Amino acid sequence: MHVQAVRRDSPPSTWISLVDERALEERLAQLQPLWDACKGDAQALHAQAPLFGVPFAVKDNIDVAGWPTTAACPAFAYTAAADAGAVRRLLQAGALLLGKTNLDQFATGLVGTRSPYGTPTSTWDASRVSGGSSSGSAVAVARGDVVFALGTDTAGSGRIPAGFNQIVGVKPTPGRVSTAGVVPACRSLDCVSIFALDVADGGEVLATVEGADPTDPFSRFLPGPAAFARPGGRRLRVGVASAPGLDAALGYDLAWAQALERLAAWKDEVEVVELDLQVLHRVGALLYEGPWVAERLHAVRSLWPRGADVFDPSVHQVIAAGEGRTAVDAFDAQYALRSLAVSAQAMFDTVDLLLVPTAPTHPTVADLRAQPLSANAALGHYTNFVNLLGWCALALPAAVTPQGLPFGVTAIAPAGLDAALLDWGLHWQRRGALASGITGWVPDGPDAPDPARPGPAVEPQMPLCVVGAHLSGQPLNHQLVERGARLQQCTHTAPAYRLHALRGTVPPKPGLERVGPGGVAIEVEVWSMPVSRMGSFLQGVPPPLAIGSVELADGRWVQGFVCEPAALREAEDISAHGGWRAWRERSTASASLAAPA
């Protein structure tokens, strides 16, 4: 991952809260034991914590334990009790949180101007909007304040700001990344998005945060192929708009022509297919003209009775349109969407992916003040439809206009093709990379990407519950990591188990026993392992251990470590400690006290 010196002189409007010196020192202290254990071995460190020490930021509608979550509305603010699912996985991977970023209030807007915490502007032109709603996250990455940042995307909030700041915006298939701990805009459509300096970084972060999450009812993790299929070696078919309707006064038409020239130069591998995209724009119109605005009202229903004064005026006006919507309206819109989705999906019978302008224009802050709703609405022309259709998207830098403005394109593919889309994005980047944001750093050019870098999952996974020597930081954890397994959840078993310290095992191991009544909840971790690697892992499981079914605290049953009953007869019952780590810490402390002075 590209890491450069972190800048801390951001405009105040970028951030809503920043890590303080004490919290930063505490986080570094947490990472120190891992650094010491790896003894400077970069490969070992990366295997244990692939994002070790990499600075990142989080949009302030995403929870971080102990930090305030404002959603850019002071009247709504609360202190988060737990990390959002995506944040938890980043911290487990060793990443270093620097702060929470500004946004359009309640993620309602594509401009970045609807916040009482200030107005972030484009890093390329301070008179123009940064894009939103993930404004601060995009600006922080474009300036090089952080290496990557989390945003959210419902209607384009993870793509428009990427285009206006010349960085990469990864918008996953809805459900691929957990939205647990995210203040919803439209919960049925929301995605956690990623801003990065290049495509490979974005893919590595997606690989870290993706995965099924039992705490998120909207989680729908679906691995897909590593690259787009090309039967018989045919060229990849890229669909483009036949009538893009771009702002010629800003040079967007010329920049789009330049992007198409880049595709045309790829003629041995790519076939450009012009398409009428009207069906997609009809889908996009449903988002704000249909009943989905009532879902935004649902998200703020506890605050709504306090009146318009606690909201940004434009945000209140948008959400107020949800009042009076009926169940009949909702079903009418769902039926219309299903019908349009059939025609939209049929496009992929003739093309493999779509390539569209990220935005048709780039308004100034003055434009938004004069026409706050219409100027914002114009920006969603190529973004509003994507989540309604359940597709994935990747915003990419494409050109710089004659007026000196960044121009971005967005590649779009059906659900589950996230890895293939990122693979294509790497090819796009290598054939004409631009400097990332305003950092001056240019991503990899003609060289091939590093195959050792983690990427999004491209094969089925299965959960594996570990209870002892395979836990994070324990001596056999490497057996999981080297097979591409990823930590999914730190949890407990159902209160139906006993844990025993087995005799004579090297390294020391526990045995988990299901006893039913009289049992306790035992600390465990659930890892996700590629199905193809599970066989080699099982071959290394020594007796008396075995893999069986384990009931978790939430009632789910997963495969995990259990123990043959015969081995438990002379084993010490350590259930009272609640888990293997606690027992090992107590044993280590006791041994230290017993050692001669």
Image (tube, helix red, strand yellow):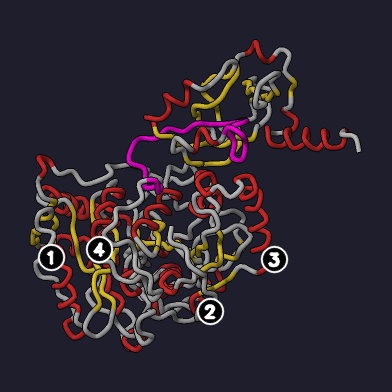
Residue marked by disc 3? 22
The amino acid pointed to by label 2 is Asp
Left/right placement of residue 515 relative to residue 195 reads right
> Residues under labels 1 and 2: Cα distance?
40 Å
Closer to us: mark 1 or mark 2? 2
Q: Nearer the viewer, residue 75 or 472?
A: 472
Closer to us: mark 3 or mark 1? 3
> Residues under labels 3 and 1: Cα distance?
52 Å
Residue marked by disc 4? 410
Residue 383's image quarter?
Answer: bottom left
- For the record, the magenta segment spans 452-476
The amino acid pointed to by label 4 is Thr
Residue 10 inside the magenta-drawn segment: no
> Residues under labels 2 and 4: Cα distance?
30 Å
> Residues under labels 4 and 1: Cα distance?
12 Å
**Nearest to N terminus: mark 3 or mark 2:** 2
Residue 459's image quarter?
Answer: top left
Q: Residues within 10 Å of mark 1 (few under 14, many from 20)?
A: some
Left/right placement of residue 399 relative to residue 213 reads left
Whether the residues at callouts 2 and 4 have beta carbons within 8 Å, the answer is no
Q: Residue at x 21, y 50 (%)?
A: 338
Q: Residue at x 15, y 78 (%)?
A: 254
Q: Is residue 117 visible?
A: no
Left/right placement of residue 373 relative to residue 259 reads right
Residue 466 inside the magenta-drawn segment: yes
> Residues under labels 4 and 3: Cα distance?
40 Å
Whether the residues at callouts 4 and 3 have beta carbons within 8 Å, the answer is no
Residue marked by disc 2? 9
Find numbered disc 2 in the image and state the secondary structure of the residue it sits on. loop
The amino acid pointed to by label 1 is Ala
